[in-house]
Amino acid sequence: ALVLGIESSCDETGVGLVAGGKLLGECTATSMDAHARFGGIVPEVAARAHLESMVPAVRTALERAGVDKSDVEAVAVTAGPGLATALTVGIAAAKAYAIALGVPLIGVHHLAGHVAADTLEHGPLPERSVGLVVSGGHTSLLMLGDLARAPVVHLGDTADDAAGEAFDKVARLLGLGYPGGPALSKAALDGDPEAIRFPRANVGKYGFSFSGLKSAVARWVETAEGPLPVADIAASFQEAVCDALTAKAVAACTDHGVDTLVIAGGVAANQRLRDLAEARCAERGISLRVPPPRLCTDNGAMIAAVGSLLVDAGAPWAPPGLSADSSAPLTAASLHPVR
Ligand code: ATP
Ligand code: MG
Ligand code: FE
């Protein structure tokens, strides 16, 4: 089925068109620059930007895919988690398109979207895989089955900050600007990852913690004398995050006898994380799957990908009252709130 996917949980207005697991076309507009001067995302500003960008983004995505809106067979939309004001704009648009076109509406969990992004590049997931979702708001280690049918089981989560949040906060601390992840990884290119041994928090078997690491960097910066070795700090911080993430993800695979690891979410765009994961997976005969960097951060194609899987599996339509669930836990790919 040809599925139109709409994503508006944060500051990206994402639209994608997917059919049979293949990406046909997409368009992403971002309000990032409008938030930069505040040092973080302002929900009302994001919502207004979604409102302005939504229809043009849908038109552009259709044009790029070379299809007409009358060809669309289902509309999938992020229903949560995310900023309620921002999600609401995407849901309203998706409902309008679904009603106007007379096609099903599917509510999708944003993090299932991050995972499904990988299927657009590498095909369907195997029967069982371990998922590591690392993004701006979440850091979770998951046991995954068939995304459209099986429940998602959490092996571990972060006890405090998400990995992307840690990148953003440390980047700000180092004066590298916003958004922090890409800026910090760029600064780290010229640094020595072994210059400073920052702590790797150990929270249970599969849990994570990054607020102690962030504080350790802050203390290091406060007590440093002379000019700050920004590149070394960035590289050492990045190494601590990537070391903790990949060690636990690989351990989860080995412990559970799973031979596929999927890493997804904005932080999966990080080249050091990709390289370290690849090396550690190769050592243990685990096959690593990571979406191409442009599909790691928020986009509409990933939501269309989930929609496509759900529609093809015969999943139920969203109720007409589908509304934003800003803190929806990830238990399944489909998100039709029952609360
Ligand atoms: P969530 O998916 O949890 O709701 P989000 O949608 O805001 O949060 P994403 O778009 O998945 O987050 O990812 C954005 C995050 O990824 C930001 O924290 C950003 O700093 C981080 N990020 C992006 N690129 C990189 C990179 N190259 N290295 C490290 N972090 C990165
Ligand atoms: Mg974003
Ligand atoms: Fe995201």
Image (spheres, rainbow, N blue to C red):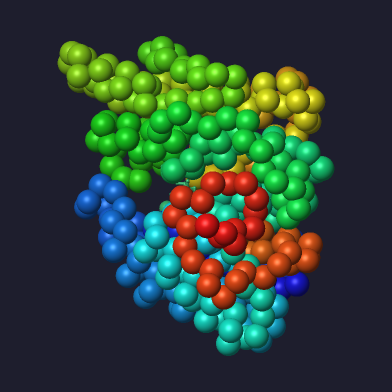
Residue closer to the observer: 183 or 148: 148
State the image coordinates of residue 202 (x, y, percent, origin top left).
Answer: 50, 17
Q: Which residue sits furthest left?
A: 226
The residue located at (60%, 80%) in the rendering is 98
**Which quarter of the rendering shows the N terminus?**
bottom right
State the image coordinates of residue 142 (x, y, percent, origin top left).
Answer: 64, 36
Quadrant hosting residue 69: bottom right
State the image coordinates of residue 273 (x, y, percent, origin top left).
Answer: 55, 31
Number of marks in picture: 0
Q: Is residue 275 visible?
A: no
59 left or right, relative to 180: right
The residue located at (53%, 72%) in the rendering is 321
Residue closer to the observer: 287 or 125: 125
The residue located at (29%, 49%) in the rendering is 40
Residue 110's place in the image compared with 144, above or below, is: below
Q: Is residue 179 visible?
A: yes
State the image coordinates of residue 245 (x, y, percent, origin top left).
Answer: 55, 27
Q: Which residue sits furthest front?
A: 339
The residue located at (59%, 62%) in the rendering is 336
Residue 273's place in the image compared with 27, above or below, is: above
203 left or right, relative to 186: right
Residue closer to the observer: 226 or 87: 87
Quadrant hosting residue 223: top left
Residue 73's place in the image compared with 87, above or below, is: below
